[in-house]
Image: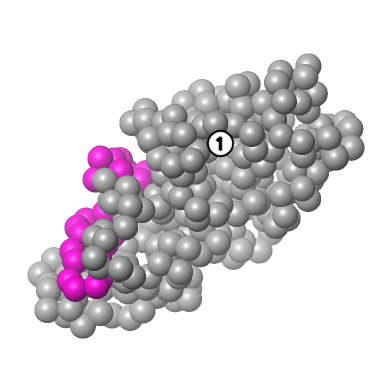
Amino acid sequence: MEKVKDWNYKMIKKIGEGGFGQVYLCRNRETRQKVAIKMITLTNQTLGFPSYIIREVSILKELDHENVVRLLEVRSSGKYVYLVFEYLHFDLFTFIERQKKTTNSLIVKAILKQILVGLAYCHSQKVIHRDLKPENVLIDLKNNIVKIADFGLARPFRVPIKYFSSREIPYSYKSPEELLGGVNEYSIPIDVWGVGCIFAEMINRERLFPFSKRFDQMSLICSLMGTPTEETWPGVTLIGDLLQRIPAYDPVDLAEEFPDLEPTGLDLLSKMLCLDPNQRITASDALKHQYLEGVENVSFALRPSPSSLLSFICLGQT
Protein backbone atom coordinates (compact mmCIF):
# COMPACT_ATOMS: atom_id res chain seq x y z
CA MET A 1 0.00 0.00 0.00
CA GLU A 2 3.05 2.26 -0.03
CA LYS A 3 2.23 3.36 -3.59
CA VAL A 4 -1.00 5.03 -2.42
CA LYS A 5 1.03 7.40 -0.27
CA ASP A 6 2.63 8.73 -3.46
CA TRP A 7 -0.81 9.58 -4.83
CA ASN A 8 -3.25 12.10 -3.45
CA TYR A 9 -4.45 9.81 -0.67
CA LYS A 10 -3.47 9.47 2.95
CA MET A 11 -3.85 5.95 4.30
CA ILE A 12 -5.77 5.83 7.58
CA LYS A 13 -5.98 2.11 8.32
CA LYS A 14 -6.67 -1.34 6.96
CA ILE A 15 -10.37 -2.18 7.24
CA GLY A 16 -10.78 -5.50 5.45
CA GLU A 17 -9.21 -8.49 3.80
CA GLY A 18 -10.39 -11.32 1.57
CA GLY A 19 -9.35 -13.89 -0.96
CA PHE A 20 -8.88 -11.29 -3.71
CA GLY A 21 -7.31 -8.39 -1.85
CA GLN A 22 -7.08 -5.99 1.05
CA VAL A 23 -9.10 -2.86 1.73
CA TYR A 24 -7.82 0.38 3.23
CA LEU A 25 -9.63 3.42 4.51
CA CYS A 26 -7.95 6.48 3.02
CA ARG A 27 -8.53 10.21 2.71
CA ASN A 28 -8.08 12.45 -0.32
CA ARG A 29 -5.51 15.06 0.71
CA GLU A 30 -7.16 17.84 -1.30
CA THR A 31 -10.88 17.22 -0.90
CA ARG A 32 -10.66 15.50 2.53
CA GLN A 33 -13.08 12.91 1.14
CA LYS A 34 -12.80 9.46 2.70
CA VAL A 35 -12.49 6.56 0.26
CA ALA A 36 -12.08 2.81 0.44
CA ILE A 37 -9.24 1.48 -1.69
CA LYS A 38 -9.20 -2.19 -2.62
CA MET A 39 -5.72 -3.45 -3.41
CA ILE A 40 -5.74 -6.57 -5.59
CA THR A 41 -2.59 -8.62 -6.16
CA LEU A 42 -2.10 -9.92 -9.70
CA THR A 43 -0.93 -13.50 -9.47
CA ASN A 44 0.30 -13.65 -13.07
CA GLN A 45 1.32 -10.31 -14.56
CA THR A 46 2.15 -11.81 -17.96
CA LEU A 47 -1.56 -12.52 -18.52
CA GLY A 48 -2.57 -8.91 -17.83
CA PHE A 49 -5.66 -7.90 -15.88
CA PRO A 50 -7.79 -10.88 -14.73
CA SER A 51 -11.16 -11.08 -16.46
CA TYR A 52 -13.09 -10.69 -13.21
CA ILE A 53 -11.47 -7.29 -12.58
CA ILE A 54 -12.19 -6.14 -16.12
CA ARG A 55 -15.82 -7.22 -15.81
CA GLU A 56 -16.40 -5.55 -12.45
CA VAL A 57 -14.72 -2.31 -13.50
CA SER A 58 -16.48 -2.14 -16.87
CA ILE A 59 -19.88 -2.74 -15.28
CA LEU A 60 -19.35 -0.19 -12.50
CA LYS A 61 -18.14 2.39 -15.00
CA GLU A 62 -21.43 2.01 -16.87
CA LEU A 63 -23.64 2.23 -13.78
CA ASP A 64 -24.47 5.66 -12.38
CA HIS A 65 -27.13 5.66 -9.69
CA GLU A 66 -27.59 6.88 -6.13
CA ASN A 67 -28.30 3.35 -4.91
CA VAL A 68 -25.25 1.74 -6.53
CA VAL A 69 -21.78 2.10 -5.00
CA ARG A 70 -19.50 4.40 -7.01
CA LEU A 71 -16.13 3.35 -8.34
CA LEU A 72 -14.13 6.59 -8.34
CA GLU A 73 -10.98 5.51 -10.14
CA VAL A 74 -8.78 2.57 -11.07
CA ARG A 75 -4.98 2.51 -10.90
CA SER A 76 -2.30 -0.10 -11.35
CA SER A 77 1.31 -0.34 -10.28
CA GLY A 78 3.48 -3.39 -10.78
CA LYS A 79 1.66 -6.46 -9.56
CA TYR A 80 -1.14 -4.48 -7.89
CA VAL A 81 -4.47 -3.06 -9.07
CA TYR A 82 -6.16 -0.40 -6.94
CA LEU A 83 -9.92 0.19 -7.06
CA VAL A 84 -10.96 3.41 -5.34
CA PHE A 85 -14.55 3.34 -4.05
CA GLU A 86 -16.67 5.88 -2.25
CA TYR A 87 -16.64 5.23 1.49
CA LEU A 88 -19.77 4.17 3.37
CA HIS A 89 -20.25 3.52 7.05
CA PHE A 90 -21.08 -0.19 7.11
CA ASP A 91 -23.08 -3.00 5.56
CA LEU A 92 -26.64 -4.16 6.12
CA PHE A 93 -25.47 -7.36 7.82
CA THR A 94 -23.96 -5.27 10.63
CA PHE A 95 -27.04 -3.05 10.74
CA ILE A 96 -29.31 -6.08 11.24
CA GLU A 97 -27.00 -7.56 13.88
CA ARG A 98 -27.10 -4.39 15.93
CA GLN A 99 -30.87 -4.18 16.13
CA LYS A 100 -31.82 -5.16 19.69
CA LYS A 101 -35.27 -6.40 18.75
CA THR A 102 -37.38 -6.44 15.61
CA THR A 103 -36.16 -3.81 13.16
CA ASN A 104 -38.48 -0.80 12.90
CA SER A 105 -40.95 -1.48 10.09
CA LEU A 106 -40.43 1.96 8.54
CA ILE A 107 -36.68 1.36 8.38
CA VAL A 108 -37.25 -2.07 6.81
CA LYS A 109 -39.47 -0.51 4.16
CA ALA A 110 -37.04 2.33 3.46
CA ILE A 111 -34.06 -0.01 3.10
CA LEU A 112 -35.99 -2.53 1.00
CA LYS A 113 -37.30 0.21 -1.29
CA GLN A 114 -33.82 1.62 -1.92
CA ILE A 115 -32.41 -1.84 -2.64
CA LEU A 116 -35.20 -2.42 -5.15
CA VAL A 117 -34.70 1.01 -6.74
CA GLY A 118 -30.99 0.25 -7.22
CA LEU A 119 -31.73 -3.24 -8.50
CA ALA A 120 -34.41 -2.05 -10.91
CA TYR A 121 -31.87 0.40 -12.29
CA CYS A 122 -29.27 -2.35 -12.74
CA HIS A 123 -31.82 -4.51 -14.53
CA SER A 124 -32.79 -1.58 -16.76
CA GLN A 125 -29.12 -1.43 -17.74
CA LYS A 126 -29.18 -5.17 -18.54
CA VAL A 127 -26.99 -6.12 -15.56
CA ILE A 128 -27.71 -8.93 -13.10
CA HIS A 129 -25.86 -8.74 -9.79
CA ARG A 130 -25.90 -12.47 -8.87
CA ASP A 131 -24.60 -12.00 -5.30
CA LEU A 132 -27.16 -10.02 -3.34
CA LYS A 133 -26.87 -10.49 0.41
CA PRO A 134 -26.77 -8.14 3.43
CA GLU A 135 -22.96 -7.95 3.30
CA ASN A 136 -23.21 -6.47 -0.20
CA VAL A 137 -25.67 -3.74 0.73
CA LEU A 138 -24.01 -0.64 2.18
CA ILE A 139 -25.48 2.13 4.29
CA ASP A 140 -24.60 5.82 4.20
CA LEU A 141 -25.77 6.98 7.64
CA LYS A 142 -25.15 10.65 6.98
CA ASN A 143 -27.55 10.79 4.05
CA ASN A 144 -29.72 7.74 4.86
CA ILE A 145 -28.87 6.14 1.54
CA VAL A 146 -28.56 2.43 0.76
CA LYS A 147 -26.24 1.25 -2.00
CA ILE A 148 -25.76 -2.08 -3.74
CA ALA A 149 -22.09 -3.11 -3.79
CA ASP A 150 -19.67 -5.85 -4.89
CA PHE A 151 -20.29 -6.41 -8.59
CA GLY A 152 -17.57 -9.05 -8.85
CA LEU A 153 -20.09 -11.66 -10.00
CA ALA A 154 -22.32 -9.33 -12.02
CA ARG A 155 -22.98 -10.16 -15.66
CA PRO A 156 -24.96 -8.82 -18.61
CA PHE A 157 -28.33 -10.48 -19.26
CA ARG A 158 -28.47 -13.92 -20.80
CA VAL A 159 -24.79 -14.81 -20.49
CA PRO A 160 -24.47 -18.63 -20.70
CA ILE A 161 -23.54 -20.23 -17.38
CA LYS A 162 -20.35 -21.76 -18.76
CA TYR A 163 -18.91 -18.24 -18.92
CA PHE A 164 -19.65 -17.48 -15.27
CA SER A 165 -16.94 -17.17 -12.63
CA SER A 166 -16.03 -20.18 -10.52
CA ARG A 167 -16.36 -17.99 -7.44
CA GLU A 168 -19.20 -19.48 -5.43
CA ILE A 169 -22.29 -17.66 -4.22
CA PRO A 170 -23.35 -18.51 -0.64
CA TYR A 171 -26.15 -21.08 -0.68
CA SER A 172 -28.17 -18.95 1.78
CA TYR A 173 -29.13 -16.56 -1.00
CA LYS A 174 -29.16 -18.86 -4.03
CA SER A 175 -32.43 -19.12 -5.89
CA PRO A 176 -34.22 -22.46 -6.40
CA GLU A 177 -33.36 -22.48 -10.10
CA GLU A 178 -29.67 -22.15 -9.23
CA LEU A 179 -29.82 -24.88 -6.59
CA LEU A 180 -31.63 -27.29 -8.88
CA GLY A 181 -29.21 -26.72 -11.74
CA GLY A 182 -29.83 -27.83 -15.27
CA VAL A 183 -30.51 -24.35 -16.65
CA ASN A 184 -28.45 -22.76 -19.40
CA GLU A 185 -28.58 -19.14 -18.30
CA TYR A 186 -29.65 -16.96 -15.40
CA SER A 187 -31.56 -13.71 -15.52
CA ILE A 188 -33.14 -11.10 -13.27
CA PRO A 189 -35.35 -13.41 -11.11
CA ILE A 190 -32.29 -14.69 -9.21
CA ASP A 191 -31.62 -11.15 -7.95
CA VAL A 192 -35.20 -10.73 -6.75
CA TRP A 193 -34.92 -13.99 -4.81
CA GLY A 194 -31.81 -12.65 -3.09
CA VAL A 195 -33.63 -9.45 -2.12
CA GLY A 196 -36.51 -11.54 -0.79
CA CYS A 197 -34.07 -13.38 1.48
CA ILE A 198 -32.65 -10.04 2.63
CA PHE A 199 -36.18 -8.77 3.32
CA ALA A 200 -36.93 -11.82 5.47
CA GLU A 201 -33.62 -11.42 7.30
CA MET A 202 -34.41 -7.82 8.19
CA ILE A 203 -37.75 -8.90 9.67
CA ASN A 204 -36.58 -11.88 11.76
CA ARG A 205 -32.93 -10.79 12.21
CA GLU A 206 -31.61 -14.17 11.11
CA ARG A 207 -30.89 -15.88 7.81
CA LEU A 208 -33.96 -17.40 6.28
CA PHE A 209 -32.15 -20.33 4.63
CA PRO A 210 -28.85 -20.84 6.52
CA PHE A 211 -27.61 -24.17 5.17
CA SER A 212 -24.29 -24.61 3.37
CA LYS A 213 -25.13 -27.70 1.28
CA ARG A 214 -27.21 -27.67 -1.87
CA PHE A 215 -29.62 -30.48 -0.92
CA ASP A 216 -30.19 -29.17 2.62
CA GLN A 217 -30.78 -25.67 1.31
CA MET A 218 -33.31 -26.74 -1.33
CA SER A 219 -35.08 -28.98 1.21
CA LEU A 220 -35.42 -26.06 3.62
CA ILE A 221 -36.80 -23.82 0.88
CA CYS A 222 -39.39 -26.47 -0.03
CA SER A 223 -40.35 -26.97 3.62
CA LEU A 224 -41.27 -23.27 3.79
CA MET A 225 -42.59 -22.48 0.31
CA GLY A 226 -43.82 -25.96 -0.62
CA THR A 227 -42.23 -28.51 -2.93
CA PRO A 228 -42.75 -27.37 -6.54
CA THR A 229 -44.70 -29.50 -8.99
CA GLU A 230 -45.41 -29.26 -12.70
CA GLU A 231 -48.62 -27.42 -11.79
CA THR A 232 -46.92 -24.75 -9.68
CA TRP A 233 -43.70 -24.55 -11.72
CA PRO A 234 -44.03 -25.89 -15.28
CA GLY A 235 -40.91 -27.74 -16.36
CA VAL A 236 -39.41 -28.07 -12.88
CA THR A 237 -39.26 -31.87 -13.01
CA LEU A 238 -36.92 -31.60 -15.99
CA ILE A 239 -34.35 -29.55 -14.05
CA GLY A 240 -31.77 -31.96 -12.66
CA ASP A 241 -32.59 -34.78 -10.23
CA LEU A 242 -32.29 -33.02 -6.86
CA LEU A 243 -36.03 -32.51 -6.52
CA GLN A 244 -36.69 -36.25 -6.70
CA ARG A 245 -35.05 -36.71 -3.29
CA ILE A 246 -37.04 -33.96 -1.53
CA PRO A 247 -40.33 -34.81 0.26
CA ALA A 248 -43.60 -33.33 -1.00
CA TYR A 249 -43.94 -30.43 1.44
CA ASP A 250 -46.98 -28.18 1.62
CA PRO A 251 -46.30 -24.44 1.89
CA VAL A 252 -46.52 -23.01 5.40
CA ASP A 253 -48.39 -19.90 6.45
CA LEU A 254 -45.81 -17.11 6.22
CA ALA A 255 -47.72 -15.19 8.90
CA GLU A 256 -46.60 -17.83 11.40
CA GLU A 257 -42.97 -17.50 10.33
CA PHE A 258 -43.07 -13.69 10.27
CA PRO A 259 -45.54 -12.63 12.98
CA ASP A 260 -44.24 -9.05 12.99
CA LEU A 261 -44.79 -8.52 9.26
CA GLU A 262 -48.02 -6.85 8.16
CA PRO A 263 -50.28 -8.59 5.59
CA THR A 264 -49.13 -6.46 2.64
CA GLY A 265 -45.51 -7.26 3.54
CA LEU A 266 -46.29 -10.97 3.66
CA ASP A 267 -47.84 -10.71 0.21
CA LEU A 268 -44.78 -8.98 -1.23
CA LEU A 269 -42.43 -11.46 0.43
CA SER A 270 -44.36 -14.40 -1.02
CA LYS A 271 -44.12 -12.86 -4.49
CA MET A 272 -40.36 -12.33 -4.14
CA LEU A 273 -39.86 -15.89 -2.89
CA CYS A 274 -42.03 -17.47 -5.58
CA LEU A 275 -40.29 -20.71 -6.57
CA ASP A 276 -41.05 -20.40 -10.28
CA PRO A 277 -38.71 -17.70 -11.63
CA ASN A 278 -41.14 -16.97 -14.46
CA GLN A 279 -43.83 -15.99 -11.94
CA ARG A 280 -41.54 -14.20 -9.47
CA ILE A 281 -42.20 -10.48 -9.15
CA THR A 282 -39.72 -8.09 -10.79
CA ALA A 283 -37.89 -5.34 -8.92
CA SER A 284 -39.81 -2.64 -10.80
CA ASP A 285 -43.17 -4.25 -10.02
CA ALA A 286 -42.19 -4.77 -6.38
CA LEU A 287 -41.68 -1.01 -6.10
CA LYS A 288 -45.34 -0.54 -7.05
CA HIS A 289 -46.54 -2.93 -4.33
CA GLN A 290 -48.88 -1.62 -1.65
CA TYR A 291 -46.38 -2.50 1.10
CA LEU A 292 -44.01 0.21 -0.14
CA GLU A 293 -46.61 2.90 -0.80
CA GLY A 294 -45.80 6.27 0.72
CA VAL A 295 -42.33 5.24 1.91
CA GLU A 296 -40.16 8.34 2.11
CA ASN A 297 -36.74 9.11 3.58
CA VAL A 298 -36.24 7.55 7.00
CA SER A 299 -33.36 8.15 9.41
CA PHE A 300 -31.48 4.92 10.10
CA ALA A 301 -29.89 6.49 13.22
CA LEU A 302 -27.29 3.86 14.08
CA ARG A 303 -23.69 4.49 15.05
CA PRO A 304 -21.17 2.28 13.20
CA SER A 305 -18.53 0.21 14.94
CA PRO A 306 -14.96 0.40 13.57
CA SER A 307 -14.74 -3.37 13.04
CA SER A 308 -17.65 -3.41 10.60
CA LEU A 309 -16.38 -1.00 7.97
CA LEU A 310 -16.77 -2.08 4.39
CA SER A 311 -15.98 -5.76 4.58
CA PHE A 312 -17.90 -6.09 1.29
CA ILE A 313 -15.08 -4.84 -0.88
CA CYS A 314 -12.90 -7.87 -0.18
CA LEU A 315 -13.98 -10.12 -3.01
CA GLY A 316 -13.90 -13.75 -2.05
CA GLN A 317 -15.51 -13.33 1.37
CA THR A 318 -18.75 -15.21 1.88
- The colouring scheme, among rainbow, by chain, secondary structure or one colour, is one colour
* Residue 39 image-quadrant placement: bottom left
Residue 239 picture location, percent across and down = 69, 30
74 part of magenta stretch: yes
Q: Amino acid at mark 1?
A: Ile
Q: Which residues are magenta?
A: 59-85
Image quadrant containing the N terminus: bottom left
What residue is shown at x 12% (from left), y 73% (from top)?
7
Q: Is 165 situated above or below 118?
A: below
Decide if residue 225 is on the left or right side of residue 33: right
Q: Let me know if residue 143 appears in the view.
A: no
> In which quadrant of the rendered image does the C terminus lie?
bottom right
Image location (x, y in percent) of residue 29: 13, 73
Sort mark 1 into few (<14), some (14-19) or many (20+) by Cα contacts within 10 Å.
Answer: many
Dot 1 corresponds to which residue?
A: 190
Up-down relation of residue 291 to residue 317 (above or below): above
